[in-house]
Image (cartoon, helix red, strand yellow):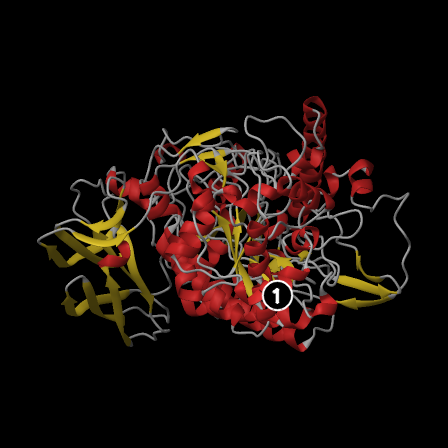
Amino acid sequence: MELYDYEKKHIELLRKAACECMVLLKSDGTFPLEKACEVALYGSGARKTIKGGTGSGDVNVRHYVTIEEGLKNAGFQITTSDWMDEYEVKYKDARKLFVKEIKQDADKKGMPAFLLGMGAVMPEPEYELPIQKDGDLAIYVLSRISGEGSDRKPIAGDLKLTRTEVRDILYLNEHFQKFMLVLNVGGIVDLSPVNHVKNILLLSQPGMTVGDSFADMILGKQYPSGKLSATWSAWEDYDSEMDFGNPDDTVYSEGMMVGYRYFDTKKIVPMYSFGFGNGYTTFRWNVTNVKQQHTKMNLSVNVENVGDFRGKEVVQVYVSMPSGKIIQPYQMLVAFQKTKELMPGEQDELNLCFDLQQFASYESGTSSRILEKGDYVVWVGTSSRDTRDCARISLKENIVVEQLQTIGQDSVDTYGTVKRSDQIKEYEDWFNRLSDEELAYLCVGGFQEKGSQSIVGNAGMKVAGAAGETTSIFTKEGLPSLVMADGPAGLRLSRQYGVDEDGIYAVGDEIPAALVEFVDEKILAMLGNSKEVKKERNGATYNQYCSAIPIGTALAQSWNVTLANECGNLVGEEMERFGVNIWLAPALNIQRSPLCGRNFEYYSEDPFISGKMAAAITKGVQSHPGCGVTVKHFCCNNQETNRFHSNSVVDERTLRDLYLRGFEIAIKEANPAAVMTSYNLLNGEHTSQRRDLNVMVLRNEWGYRGLVMSDWLVSGFAMEHKYPSACAAGCIKAGNDLIMPGGEAEIQNIMEALHHPDSKYSISRRDLEECAASVIRTVKAFV
């Protein structure tokens, strides 16, 4: 298998990056190993290793390295191939039954099976397979996968361990001198039955080099230096009163108390705290200088490697705010920095800066961000539960940092008058020449005659496997289409494509692998891929192999914005190579509950580290001319259950201070090319149809001038729900500039709304011109 030069370069980067994302939760000092040896390898992820989650976040790589393969590449002799062979048989049998049950359930509900199968988690099967007793070293790789379309469940085989897993893990830990439990997971797993084992590594899902990177790590060629970006504990420790997964209305009654904010405020000691992570060495740190100027603070921290192995440390700064009129969590993250690689005895001096005004709280009574008078306690440490009180900022009176307007209410009728700060005068001459319908085409993604009916982003026409494009009908006027590709773990494109007289076409990869089992001839016909209508094409074929970077959660676990920037640069290089203009990433929704099926795509339970990581990867991508990102999903997309029609009920303080803050950081620091609205409703109206979000917040408050686009197929599917689907006209009315992936139905909906001024989502020609101007401005910035 001869790799292209760019593949070799990117694999080299990712092989090292993956180790920086791994978190060593427990260690008895037996790792790293001195050399490769015989190893008894067990667990669901040993051979069926997971590089990343399912759905639009998957990446069609040329090849990725499993744990079994990586250990063999490193010279280990695996003694348990028979066990893995037998496990595969058990897994396939369980999978067949799982798919059959989903299809039967779909038939009963009168819905396509792929809607239930998308992202559905098959619980790990129970099995009776003999464990080999001989050997010095045993490794058990526990895997969990989740994805777009379905949420996780607190049951055995998903968030909890199965009886079989607990039995085998404990047996190996007792009978082998050296044992490591490896967690090849995208989200939290309840480890309480096995938490006392000798060594636990959160491998996570760090991309295409996962197996080789793991082998490097246990042999000491690399080392784990990651820290948790979410709190890990027993399922029973999480907020039992949190409303999650309600198909209609999910009430965010916990407010700001999410993740470590909840654990710290309620004084619940978690199994592994936010920001926690061990390494092969130990560090000593001291605050050497503190400088304060009003609300600004600069901390100098000296970090020394006092152990016997090289490594990196992460210093974190938290602030406890006074609880006056505004109820505050115990503390919040306000700064962090990772050291350079330190050899034993080596030191590094870090400077951590923050301004309290950036963390001012929203006060609903006055619609303002304020800092209340009182003492602000500054904590420095290496996890949220391992800190020292290092400074205080005392404010003698309240400070009004910013005056805002009320948003997010349960009625958006009053927001029709919110003015956009953007001007359309620069395109006025052009608009005067365009008909209403031509304007509508500018605001709808490019589509062929039959429209784009993408299940998981595959509506591109210029690049095989791309998620979609802007319209191409104005190419002769100097306005070509922009190509968009899914993310956020790399570009999602077809591995091979062909070119003939009719244009490009995908060679394989037309239906995502995770959905193939659930797609029947009826769905294939809708996509134009059924056996009856699919045309045989025999053009010249070409490769477009993309690289799978670490999932969002893993990247955040690195706590390294430089690494995030490098991964963004990698993606930008591949965008240039394959002709992609806009990457549908990064995803930075808050990990509100461990059950969200799409948490692996998101960075953290904390908005500060989420925003910083998103800004860094954005800068990396957009350092390449003609390449841009799309931060998503704006906003409160925190569950997959009934994702097209679920209503997130959130108070304004929580909305602004928790769920919008990461977006604000990324937008103000990195100016992403586009923002994608989410499927869900917010307080009774779809986010794509809220002018207060898309115009008042994004454009008027944050000064954003980029493109606002919908998620794919916002109109959903023709099924009965409490809340109706979003519509193209409603999006345009709300300042959602571009409706993706595009189709004739969206054009018709817009034209009808133009001519029916009494309808709820009636629009004016100026509404269309405002959105079209944003599309034109974006396209011109890329060409």
- Image coordinates for residue 707, horizontal then vertical, percent: 54, 58
* Residue 592 placement, left or right of 482: left
Where is residue 570 drawn, in percent x and y? Answer: 56, 70
Q: Taking the image as drawn, is residue 328 in sight?
A: yes
Give the camera-side residue of 402 and 51.
402
Report the residue that reaches farthest toward the left: 396
Dot 1: what SS? Answer: helix
Which quarter of the rendered picture does the N terminus lie within? bottom right
> Does 299 sit left or right of 761 as displayed?
left
The residue that label 1 is drawn on is: 429
Provide residue 652's location: percent of width, then percent of height.
34, 40
Left or right of 449 in this view: 154: left
Which quarter of the figure has residue 782? Answer: bottom right
Q: Which amino acid type is marked by label 1? A: Asp
How many neighbours does mark 1 have within 10 angstroms: few (below 14), some (14-19), or many (20 or more)? few
Question: Image height check: is 127 above or below 282?
Answer: above
Q: Nearer the viewer, residue 163 or 563?
A: 563
Query: Who's the residue at 69% across and 44% down the image?
Result: 455
Rendered residue at 44%/51% (across/down): 419
- Name the quadrant containing residue 116: top right
Q: Is 172 above or below relative to 23?
A: above
